[in-house]
Amino acid sequence: MSSRRVIPIGPYHPLQEEPEFFKLIVEGETVVDMEINLGYNHRGHEFLSPELTYDQIPFLVERICGICSNSHPLACVLALEDICGIKPAPRGAYIRTIIHELERIHSHLLWVGLAGHFIGYNTVWMWAWRYREHILEVFEMITGNRNHYAANKPGGARRDILPEQVPQILAALDVAEKKTVMLTNAVLDDPVIRVRLERVGVLTREQAIAYAVVGPTARASGVDIDVRRDDPHDAYAEVPWSVPVLPGGDVFAKAKVRLLETLESIKIIRACLREMPDGPIQVRVEEIPPGEGIGHTEAPRGEVFHYLRSDGSNRPLRHKIRAPSYMNIASNVLAVKGGSIADAALTLAAVDPCYCCTERMAAFEDGKLKYSGRELLKLSWAKTERLRERRP
Amino acid sequence: MRQAEAGLRELILEAEVYEHNPQRLYIRIPRERLTAAAQYLHRECGMRLATCTGIDTREGFEVLYHFSEDKTGIMYTLKVLAPKDDPRIESQAPWLPAADWIEREMHELLGMDFPGHPNLIPLLTSDTDWDKSKYPLRRDFERRNEAHEQ
């Protein structure tokens, strides 16, 4: 084919600021094929994990991702609990559920904002990230960090949610709910956005099943799966909620599924705060016996899967980690085919590929670093204290 | 007994089923029967291939195919063993695209071979400066860790 050309997106993605390489093969304006190259930032967590003790591993896997930094440690401690055959302390299970759902809200709002940015609708971007800020402040108040909450440990949660914090969480949820409803209506009713997103980057149900995609990518293609409901852990079986599933498979359906899920998450957190039992937040785990365990949970992007094999020592023999984007990005090959080049950037972003954004700030004045790392940490602690003292 | 488990026992007589708990089943099968078992779980039982795990054990290379039955939440893990001097397992990628990347990953990180794979090229390691004869997930891989050397 003489008319075929190659358009590279990457190795450093211009919009997503992430090292990945999509090689679009185009005929005129139409994308006919794509090659995906990964591994520019492979950090070898599966290699590192057997060198660490079981106490250290949740902190290692927490750093796989800055956005879903609760999903990996949660799946990891679920795998450890699976080996031991124990259940977490009831109050700890509720706390883990609350943090997991707060994470989903902030992650989905982040994606909605980015999707707006990708189509040149920067108002949506600024709105969504503004409303996400309330959730991050809740995180800072209850865990001390905006990201990397360090909330999970085998047998329960590491930190309690205090009664005086509950009104603040509820107030933030009220804001998040009102704004998400407003955003959902504004985005879904906008004729320009509909034209831009509908029937773009379609992944059919059959393709979604063959590629085993997970999370909102699967649910927007009509595949009714959700680990939280199918293999419930923590408090998911005890509170009422539903799984939104849409048949479209296009970018519009993916956006809508995420917005509807955000509202479900708010429902779950409210129910958890209402029904949370008193008592200890963790049960003591003496040792990890020899054996193998699987832990999986529904991260904002889909199923996070952890497999651990123990030989009875304090380190694992093998730790397999599979993040949801690993399955979802592979399906991009199908979703971009037949679309235009302009749609490709959006389609590639629609599975919400995950990247890290944990660095908070570095302040310079007159060409010199203004604060040292220690000083920044002190400023950060002071802000956390201010958040904790604030009453709604 | 679960329907899928019964079907699998009927299909593969040598299957050894170990039930860790009602939600987690591990089924050891001969490696020649992997394709038949995987096709049964995916096509007949509608299961989703979550991922695979390759492990370097004393007995050989153990490869685990984790299938998730999403309507019940039960994890069915097929276990196959390949001897160290012949680390070959028939590729599942030609009929199941979900196995494509993970088999490439096991090929480059553990040194497994998957005959029949349409595109068995490295996925994660560098194209230019990675020694392709080294497999970091093997037990004999030299770990250069200063903390361990002290």
Image: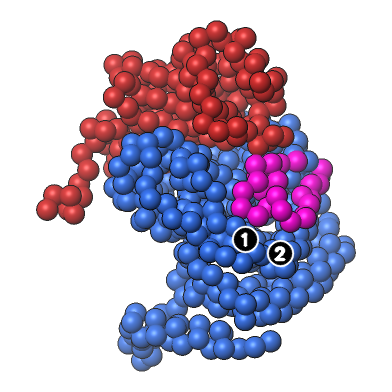
Q: Residue at x 44, y 55 (%)?
A: A284
Q: Is residue A384 above or below residue A59?
A: below
Mark 1 or 2 closer to N-term? 1
- Callout 1 and callout 2 share a chain: yes
Instruction: Residue under label 1, please give it.
Output: A94
Location of residue B5 by image quarter: top right
Q: Give coordinates of residue A324: x percent, y percent.
A: 57, 46
As helix, strand or loop, the secondary structure at mark 1 comes to: helix
As helix, strand or loop, the secondary structure at mark 2 comes to: helix
Q: What colour is chain B?
A: red
Residue type marked 1 = Tyr
- Residue nearest the observer in this picture, A143 or B131: A143
Please give left or right for residue A26 compared with residue B86 in the image.
Answer: right
Q: Does the magenta stretch include residue A226?
A: yes
Q: Is residue A31 visible?
A: no
Residue type marked 2 = Glu
Q: Dots 1 and 2: beta carbons under 8 Å?
A: yes
Q: Which numbered dot is residue A275?
A: 2
Write the start and end of the magenta stretch as one range. Answer: A224-247
Chain ID, blue in image? A
**Chain name for mark 1:** A
Q: Is residue A104 above or below residue B48?
A: below
Q: Is residue A239 visible?
A: yes
Residue placed furthest toward the front: A279
